[in-house]
Image (cartoon, rainbow, N blue to C red):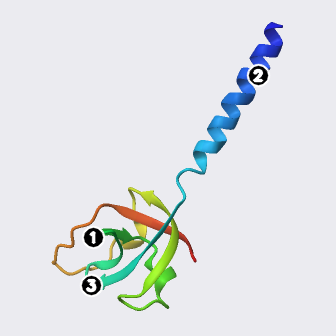
Amino acid sequence: MKKASQLLFLGISSALLFSCATVHDRLQTGTIVRDCTGTYLRVAENEDYLVCNAEILESKKDGEKVSLVYDNTDKCPERDGKIMCMMYHENKGMIRVKSVK
């Protein structure tokens, strides 16, 4: 009986762990915004998210509506060492686009 309850606990824990791993993917519809500081996804009213892997959106025009699947991130190595303008662009954080719908 004890072994069965341990197996059940292990199974439930594993299921919860793997289900949490997929929560990070988000589908969001927004507008592409570009300036000299980078490429952003604008959602809601003036909530911009800096796109780290902006090359995935090269074919999209500034102001175009898109639906993206993305993860939030706290590192953006693609921008390391790149010269950006001195303008400040307020944003809610950085994202890494996984796919464009």
Q: Which image quarter: residue 89?
A: bottom left
Percent x, y of residue 23 = 55, 50
When the figure is inspected, residue 90 is found, relative to residue 13, above or below; the finding is below
Q: Nearer the viewer, residue 8 or 39?
A: 8
C-alpha distance separating marks 2 and 3: 53 Å
Is residue 91 toward the left or the right of residue 74 in the image? left
Report the amino acid beneath label 1: Glu
Report the amino acid beneath label 2: Leu
**Chain-order first, disc 2 or disc 3:** 2
Percent x, y of residue 75 = 39, 59
**What residue is shown at x 43% (from left), y 83% (from top)?**
65
Secondary structure under badge 3? strand
**Residue, disc 3:** 35
The numbered mark at residue 14 is none
C-alpha distance separating marks 1 and 3: 18 Å
**What residue is shown at x 33% (from left), y 73% (from top)?**
81
When the figure is inspected, residue 31 is found, relative to residue 22, above or below; the finding is below
Q: Is the residue under label 3 in contact with that under label 2 (CB below 8 Å)?
A: no
**Mark 2 Cα-neighbour bin, 10 Å: few <14, some 14–19, many ≥20:** few
Percent x, y of residue 72 = 44, 58
Secondary structure under badge 2? helix
**Residue, disc 2:** 8
When the figure is inspected, residue 31 is found, relative to residue 44, above or below; the finding is below
Q: Nearer the viewer, residue 64 or 39?
A: 64
Secondary structure under badge 1? loop
Is residue 13 toward the left or the right of residue 81 in the image? right
The numbered mark at residue 45 is 1
Q: Specify the quadrant that holds the C terminus.
A: bottom right
Is residue 48 toward the left or the right of residue 95 in the image? left
**Chain-order first, disc 1 or disc 3:** 3
